[in-house]
């Protein structure tokens, strides 16, 4: 049997990336199942043991000789070259984070290239993306935009297939783009050897803790979405008044956990450890009684730090949200988001910490779960099966389905044109004429028909004696069908010109809202 030729493209150790650590675990069990070559990304260091153990090739040779690129894509700057290669040379893409917006910011706005960023948003998300790109010109780019516009459609549609780690992630991708070929393969996490009690005792002594004091832990790069701030608030609750919290991992500059802990009066029970190497990381997990892995919003990732916690035989607390809903309550405690989150977290954790037997049982269940579902050898076989299945597929194409246009109920920008035939001067007093009116939609929105109620468009036709006059003898012409961008509709209306100076005004209105002149909409005004 001919082995599949794979070029493995990913950040590698010692890069401080969870995907680099993942590669260390996966490569040894993947190599016997395929003809494997590891790509060395330009400008990124490679650990000596990788250089000695693997056949390395430069990024420029990715996919050469009919080899299948296997890309590992994450949402940080270490994947910029992975992104470029995947767009240029289609392969099979393991999508570790569903949301890649942050990566696009790194590749465009970080270099001041606003136009490239806006174009990428528009290409992936149509008018919604274009609007978000325009807003960024004025400095508007909150987290809601980054997480709601994932910026992965063009990339995924250019690949032969996509692999994700959870059924939730697979469902999200297929719901947004059913044409994609998506396979679910669990994340590979080796079962670690139990940490020696002496090592855990040494870590507790380093923190100034006795064997009986309860210790919570949160692990990995600390950003606002890790909800560490919520954990600190909960630590100030009466039910956790004697509990300590270890924070192991680098802290984002946007967080000031020291200051928050001080303001809450819990500084003496909060231990900021900073970045820990792999061995210290495992010891830190083993030292904790219960680990926190709260998350909101999510980039769709399967949390490697959570799986390593479970693999160490430690139960965890997770947000009851997205992919975490797939986890059994026999090994994790789920805390709802929203109002009362801090109080619910404090009460639930406090109750659980009082039940050491349940903590031990949850930890054992967690370790068995990882051993059964995330065994690297089993994962490697599943990944190769997916690669064999996807390797010969053609990409579905780079043009994603455009989202439906906005409507007159919501859109703020509604330019159009009004043309009127039959109102030419002179128009004698009391003469009756039939006018032909053509309304054209020049906006990016769908103009709703009048029968749709609020948001529906009607033409108001009336005479005025002056522009200050509110109008008289008003006639309403309802839009009979929705007008898509670029479409027009023809109306006929019969009018009798009143005596004296008369100004004829024809203008579209939106039912229940206003006229659209203020939104760039058309109106037609003539003194006849």
Image (tube, helix red, strand yellow):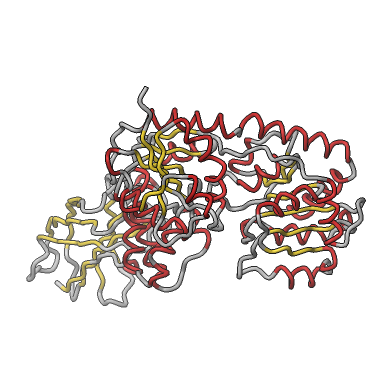
The quarter of the rendered structure image containing the C terminus is bottom left
**Residue appearing at x 63%, y 44% in the figure:** 321
Above-or-below relation of 361 to 502: above
Give the image location of residue 56, x and y in percent. 41, 48
Q: Can you give x and y, in whole percent of width and height, for residue 323 in the image?
A: 59, 41
Question: Where is the N terminus found, in terms of image quarters?
Answer: top left
In this rendering, the count of numbered labels is: 0
> Residue at left 38%, top 53%?
83
**What's the residue at 83%, 66% (across, down)?**
266
Left or right of residue 478: residue 231: right
Q: Residue at x 53, y 38 (%)?
A: 28
Point out residue 36 in the picture as x, y percentages from the top left corner. Answer: 41, 38
Against 448, residue 186 (above or below) is: above
Image coords of residue 144 (percent x, y): 52, 58
59 versus 137 height, above or below: above
Tell me the quarter of the picture where residue 242 sits: bottom right
Tell me, yes or no, if residue 401 can be seen here. no
Which sits in the foreground, 255 or 512? 255
Q: Front-most of 187 and 31? A: 31
Q: Is residue 108 above or below residue 350?
A: below
- In the image, is 106 to the left or to the right of 522? right
Q: Nearer the viewer, residue 53 or 469?
A: 53
Name the foreground residue: 376 vs 144. 376
């Amino acid at each position: 049997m001919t082995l599949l030729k794979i070029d493995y493209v990913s950040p590698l150790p010692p890069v401080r990336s969870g995907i680099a650590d993942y590669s260390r675990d996966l490569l040894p069990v993947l190599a016997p199942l395929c003809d494997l070559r590891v790509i060395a990304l330009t400008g990124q260091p490679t650990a000596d043991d990788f250089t000695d153990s693997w056949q390395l090739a430069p990024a420029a040779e990715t996919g050469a000789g009919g080899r299948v690129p296997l890309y590992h894509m994450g949402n940080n700057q270490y994947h910029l070259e992975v992104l470029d290669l995947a767009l240029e040379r289609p392969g099979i893409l393991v999508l570790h984070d569903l949301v890649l917006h942050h990566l696009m910011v790194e590749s465009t706005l970080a270099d001041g290239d606003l136009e490239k960023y806006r174009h990428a948003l528009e290409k992936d998300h149509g008018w919604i993306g274009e609007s978000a790109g325009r807003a960024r010109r004025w400095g508007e780019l909150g987290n809601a935009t980054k997480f709601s516009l994932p910026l992965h459609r063009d990339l995924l549609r250019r690949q032969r297939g996509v692999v994700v780690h959870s059924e939730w992630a697979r469902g999200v991708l297929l719901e947004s783009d059913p044409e994609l070929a998506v396979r679910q393969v669990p994340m590979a996490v080796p079962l670690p050897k139990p940490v020696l009690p002496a090592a855990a005792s040494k870590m507790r002594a380093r923190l100034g803790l006795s064997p009986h004091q309860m210790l919570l832990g949160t692990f990995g790069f600390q950003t606002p979405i890790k909800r560490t701030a919520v954990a600190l608030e909960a630590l100030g609750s009466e039910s956790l008044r004697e509990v300590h919290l270890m924070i192991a991992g680098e802290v984002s500059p946007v967080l000031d956990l020291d200051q928050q802990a001080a303001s809450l009066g819990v500084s003496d029970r909060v231990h900021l450890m900073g970045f820990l190497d792999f061995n210290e990381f495992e010891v830190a997990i083993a030292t904790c009684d219960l680990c926190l892995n709260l998350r909101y919003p999510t980039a769709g990732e399967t949390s490697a730090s959570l799986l390593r916690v479970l693999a160490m035989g430690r139960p965890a607390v997770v947000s009851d949200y997205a992919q975490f809903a797939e986890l059994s309550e026999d090994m994790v405690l789920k805390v709802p988001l929203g109002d009362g989150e801090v109080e619910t977290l404090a009460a639930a954790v406090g109750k659980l910490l009082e039940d050491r037997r349940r903590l031990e049982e949850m930890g054992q269940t967690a370790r068995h779960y990882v051993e059964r579902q995330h065994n690297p050898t089993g994962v490697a076989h599943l990944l190769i099966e997916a690669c064999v299945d996807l390797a010969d597929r053609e990409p579905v194409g780079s043009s994603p389905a455009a989202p439906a246009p906005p409507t007159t109920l919501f859109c703020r920008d509604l330019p159009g044109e009004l043309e009127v035939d039959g109102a030419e001067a002179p128009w004698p007093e009391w003469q009756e004429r039939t006018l032909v009116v053509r309304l054209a939609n020049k906006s990016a929105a769908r103009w709703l028909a009048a029968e749709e109620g609020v948001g529906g468009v009607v033409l108001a036709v009336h005479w005025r004696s002056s522009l200050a006059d509110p109008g008289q003898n008003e006639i309403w012409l309802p839009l009979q069908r929705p007008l898509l961008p670029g479409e027009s509709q023809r109306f006929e209306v019969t009018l009798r010109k009143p005596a004296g100076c008369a100004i004829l005004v024809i203008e579209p209105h939106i039912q229940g809202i206003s006229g659209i002149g203020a939104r760039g909409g058309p109106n037609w005004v003539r003194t006849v």
